């Protein structure tokens, strides 16, 4: 169990690094949508190899003929979520790009639980869960707003509040993706099969979107090999969660991954790594991160 917890924390820490790498890839290509497509395609290849190595069955036909249409939309939510993160990270910072979607994920999860959407069990809004949601919002405000004035004074553009709203809305898509993919995993009998299907749907969707918008790629020769590993990090995150959830339980697995996401996001901000605008870690921002973690735990366990 200790190994599983450590792996979940490490896997969670891959998410802000993945977003930063994808943002660099987008900057090098000169276009966001092609960068998203590359990331999803690489992740699909990685998960496909994992399915082949493990001999995991992927029951496409049975799922298509017996399940509702929305069983496939997890990949669509994932492609929008990934693309928005690539846009947001260089503008609002790594920590905010992690924390704001978490607000949307928690609030969206509460709504899905209340409605019993996507064939999930109905869970009422208890006092403890409501308190957890409030802590997430408060902590997100501390992580996102503290130190913003110093960044603006240093010559960086002031991000529009609309971008913060976009970050929260992106998180609601993450909540939908989690619910849908969870149902898909139950239907297919495998979290790995569900993850592969989600990535393949996302890749197919991004192919269509790229064909429709025809964003011009500025250059390909300047792309470095390390800029292509973002998709593998995303695939590794999904795979670790699929393996660890039965061992740790969903709540503990998600909370451990969240710890890794928030901590690594703060580290990237503090050091200004991978081209991110540097925002030093302060006591207030650390408190905010801890409030977010505590809030998510209350929502999950309340």
Image (tube, rainbow, N blue to C red):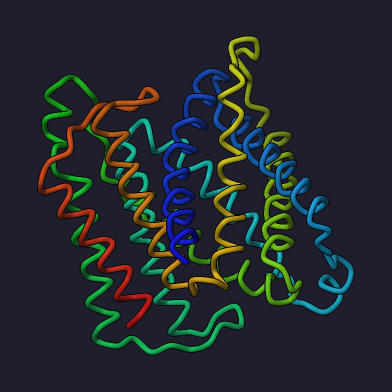
Q: Decide if residue 146 is on the left or right side of residue 234.
A: left
Residue toward you, 25 or 239: 239
Which quadrant of the structure image shows residue 54? bottom right
In the image, residue 164 above or below residue 159: below
Residue at 47 percent of width and 77 percent of height = 112
In the image, residue 189 above or below residue 40: below
Task: Give the tally of numbered discs.
Answer: 0
Residue at 62 percent of width and 47 percent of height = 235
Going by the picture, which residue comes out furthest to the front? Answer: 2
Residue toward you, 22 or 115: 22
Residue toward you, 197 or 53: 53
Residue at 68 percent of width and 28 percent of height = 214
Q: Position of residue 177 (x, y in %)?
A: 56, 63
Q: Position of residue 259 (x, y in %)?
A: 34, 55
Q: Decide if residue 294 is on the left or right side of residue 240.
A: left
Residue at 44 percent of width and 33 percent of height = 20
Q: Quadrant of the C terminus?
A: bottom left
Which quadrant of the structure image shows residue 158? top left
Going by the picture, which residue comes out furthest to the right? Answer: 61
Q: Decide if residue 200 is on the left or right side of residue 253.
A: right
Going by the picture, which residue comes out furthest to the top? Answer: 221
Q: Position of residue 168 (x, y in %)?
A: 36, 55
Q: Decide if residue 249 is on the left or right side of residue 88.
A: right
Q: Position of residue 126 (x, y in %)?
A: 30, 88
In the image, residue 32 above or below residue 166: above
């Amino acid at each position: 169990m200790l190994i599983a917890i450590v792996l979940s924390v490490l896997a969670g820490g891959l998410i802000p690094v993945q977003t930063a790498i994808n943002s660099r890839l987008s900057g090098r290509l000169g276009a966001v949508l092609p960068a998203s497509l590359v990331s999803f395609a690489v992740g699909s290849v990685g998960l496909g190899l994992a399915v082949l190595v493990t001999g995991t069955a992927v029951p496409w036909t049975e799922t298509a003929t017996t399940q509702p249409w929305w069983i496939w939309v997890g990949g669509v939510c994932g492609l929008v979520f990934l693309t928005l993160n690539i846009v947001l990270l260089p503008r609002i910072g790594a920590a905010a790009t992690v924390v704001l979607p978490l607000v949307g994920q928690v609030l969206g999860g509460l709504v899905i639980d209340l409605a019993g959407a996507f064939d999930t069990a109905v869970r009422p809004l208890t006092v403890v869960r409501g308190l957890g949601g409030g802590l997430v919002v408060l902590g997100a405000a501390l992580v996102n707003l503290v130190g913003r004035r110093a960044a603006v004074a240093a010559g960086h553009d002031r991000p529009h509040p609309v971008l913060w709203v976009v970050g929260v809305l992106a998180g609601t898509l993450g909540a939908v993706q989690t619910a849908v993919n969870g149902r898909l995993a139950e239907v297919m009998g495998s979290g790995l099969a569900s993850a592969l299907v989600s990535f393949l749907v996302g890749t197919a969707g991004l192919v269509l979107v790229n064909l429709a918008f025809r964003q011009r790629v500025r250059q390909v020769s300047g792309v470095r090999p390390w800029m292509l590993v973002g998709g593998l990090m995303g695939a590794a995150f999904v795979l670790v969660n699929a393996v660890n959830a039965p061992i740790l339980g969903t709540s503990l697995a998600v909370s451990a991954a969240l710890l890794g996401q928030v901590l690594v996001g703060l580290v990237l901000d503090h050091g200004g790594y991978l081209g991110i605008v540097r925002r030093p870690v302060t006591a207030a921002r650390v408190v905010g991160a801890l409030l977010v973690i505590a809030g998510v735990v209350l929502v999950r366990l309340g």
